[in-house]
Amino acid sequence: MIEIQNIHKAFGSNVVLSGIDAIFEPGKVSLIIGGSGSGKSTLLKCIVGLHQPEQGKVFFDKKEFTHMDFEEKIPIRKEIGMLFQNSALFDSMTVEQNIIFTLDMFSDMSRSEKVDRANFCLERVNLAGKNKLYPAELSGGMKKRVGIARAISMSPKYLFCDEPNSGLDPATSILIDELIQDLTQEYSCTTIIVTHDMNSVMGIGEYILFLHKGQKFWEGSNQDMLNSDTKELNDFVFASPLMKAARQVIK
Amino acid sequence: MFFYHFGEYVLLLKKVFKRPEKWKIYWRETLHEMNEIGVGSVGLIVIISTFIGAVMTMQIAFQLVSDLIPSSVIGQINRDSNILELGPTISALVLMGKVGSSISSQIGSMRVTEQIDALEIMGINAAGYLILPKLIAGVIMVPVLVTIAIFCAIVGGLLGGALTGAVTPNEYIMGIQSEFRGFTIVVAMVKAFFYGFIITTVPAHKGFHVRGGALEVGQAGTKAVVIGCISILASDYIITALML
């Protein structure tokens, strides 16, 4: 479980996050949604420790993470898997090397065990046999899947995804969403996804945190969202005529 | 502003010298960087130093027109100039352009494509993993390249003198053998060691702290080379003042 309390973050005089509280439970897919510039990615970076919030605390299973030093954070970071918006695969390494990189660094597994693990992870994301390709040789969707394979290589307890569907076609987006949902259940991990893809919100959003102008405006499940009266949320989620119509039909 | 960036550089170095997560991986990376920085630059260093040595011989001969000065002095001046200054410093400036810009853009690209964030999320000391192998490779390989540069410049001087008739090979060889002081080699190696440090760490610092996109990565590379070259010349002055 991940708990955040009263997170404040500013860049100079620009206040990006103000007093955010939330609890993200294990085995559930949690989404952070909001318009561009609402602070979603900044909140995710505060949670994983890439940004230091000015105020507030982040707890990973009751352990206060925010004020730990680099060495103290390492055991928790070994339990984190993260998928970046642009996949952030290491360009100079093959797909296989990308996946076994953390195993190389932190495990005492033999070479064949590491390759077996890489093959397992690649099969899990339907990319078996792509071991020797370089990131430059992969499509956007394949990069995302390799990113997921890398994220699960250490069997994570916490999985973070920053806009996993950005730049993907609808069919591939759904595949990625289903994959993340399956992995969340398989590893019982606490999964947090930053997205503004409404298909993901309606499809896999078991817990949704809506940010607006750096503040928490609403939280609930995708079912609760359909009945919400929060104007800002409705303006954001049901902005298009298609989504408005879909809401009426579902209701 | 200077103190802000210098402080940032010192703090980065503090991170670089933290204990590696796995020595084996760092060693493998160091060998890779030694190949990139060292072996990859041999050709350029050989060509540049040979021409510099040849040109030096011709220019010294042009200036020494007195009958009272033996031609063998050309070899002697060429040797000392190349050992003390041209070999280490010109090589370092050339390497700053070649290796420095490459390091800056490599690390800068990793920063803007979130690869450095990915390393940190994994619990890896990104500064140590990316910079320490380059630094070790730099302080080992730059002295090796400087040694090659000095040798090539002296041989280039011999060839330049022989081809233009500025000095005969016998006189030149007599010159390079006379009044040789081994301490000049020590000075050259000390310079090369510090240059190796600057060539790797200054661009790494610029690349590591890039914010933005491709444009900023390019600007960081330019800044790294400019600041690196100035640092090389400043350290050249300080080392020379302290050792000679």
Image: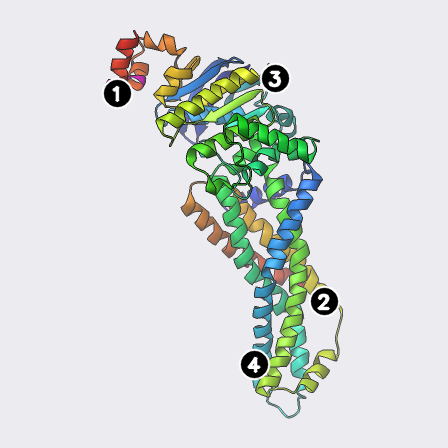
Q: Percent position (x, y) of residue B130?
A: 59, 43
- Between the C-alphas of marks 1 and 2, the distance is 75 Å
Q: Which residue is mark 2?
A: B185
Q: Which residue is mark 4?
A: B59
- Between the C-alphas of marks 4 and 1, the distance is 77 Å
Label 2: few (<14), some or many (≥20) within 10 Å?
Answer: some
Q: Nearer the viewer, residue B84 or A62?
A: A62
Q: Which amino acid lies under the numbered mark 2 shown in the image of this protein?
A: Ile
Residues marked 3 and 2, same chain: no
Q: Which residue is mark 3?
A: A63
Task: Label 3: state its secondary structure.
Answer: strand
Which residue range is magenta in the image? A237-241
Q: Residue at x 62, y 80 (%)?
A: B159
On the question of residue A51 being in view, the answer is no
Chain ID, mark 2: B
Q: Residue at x 35, y 20 (%)?
A: A198
